[in-house]
Amino acid sequence: MNRSPITFFLLFFWGTSYAASQQYQEISLSNRQELRQKFNSGTSINSFKDVTHAISWIGQQSFHLRNKIPDDRKRRELLRMIHYEATRYQLDPDLVLALIEVESGFNRFALSHVGASGLMQVMPFWKGLIGSEKDSLFDVQTNLRYGCIILRHYLDIENNNLERGLARYNGSLGSDTYPSMVLGVWRSKFRYASS
């Protein structure tokens, strides 16, 4: 795919902003409280099965991100955070990597024209629903936590149907374009080969 220099500038400066269509939908008070409780939960988990799994997964995924995040230490730290937040909300970390690739190209400062922010292009209205208005969506861990809990919420609504959950995340329920892009990147680039 050939892209002009202007396209690269726009993708770098504003991100791909696919989540810009996330729709505000009223969430029942009980669901809002549950999401807020999950968001604020400080429960610590070990997201890797063992040290061998951690070394293998981080090594494989680090290889795919070396051109986007040249600093090895920063790249590995980001991967550990992604794995932790994804696992914390029972998401496939590889799928979260694919979603980030499509949403922002791993630009933590990506900002869409409607305000979707950060790696996972989270819409600001979520801060009022499950977090705090003071939260910075450009803080990597905060953005990952928001994005993962939002994706988990949509997958729960859709009984773990990946295509429909991803479409809800993107605000494009009824279209398979966005889910196909994320799942295509997941299968071709980030799907972890454990052997």
Image (cartoon, rainbow, N blue to C red):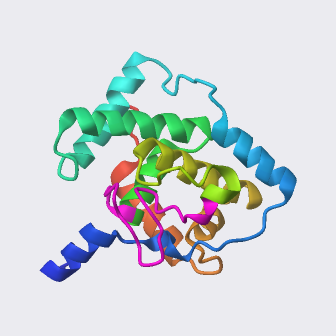
Query: Is residue 168 among what the camera can see?
Result: yes
Q: Is residue 144 rendered magenta in the image?
A: no
Residue at 67%, 71% (x, y): give it.
24
Residue 187 relative to residue 130: left or right: left
Image location of residue 79, percent across then percent down: 36, 38
For residue 56, what is the image quadrant?
Answer: top left
Where 1 sits versus 76, above or below? below
Chain part drawn in magenta: 104-126
Residue drawn at 62 percent across, 65 percent down: 125
Instruction: Name the residue nearer the viewer: 113 or 107.
Output: 113
Give x and y (percent) for residue 32. 77, 53
The residue sitting at 65% across, 67% down in the picture is 164
Q: Measured from the top left, where is residue 103 in percent x and y? A: 41, 64
Magenta stretch: includes residue 105 = yes
Q: Is residue 126 shown above or below 4?
A: above
* Front residue of 138 and 121: 138
Q: Is residue 105 above or below residue 67?
A: below
Residue furthest out toward the left: 5
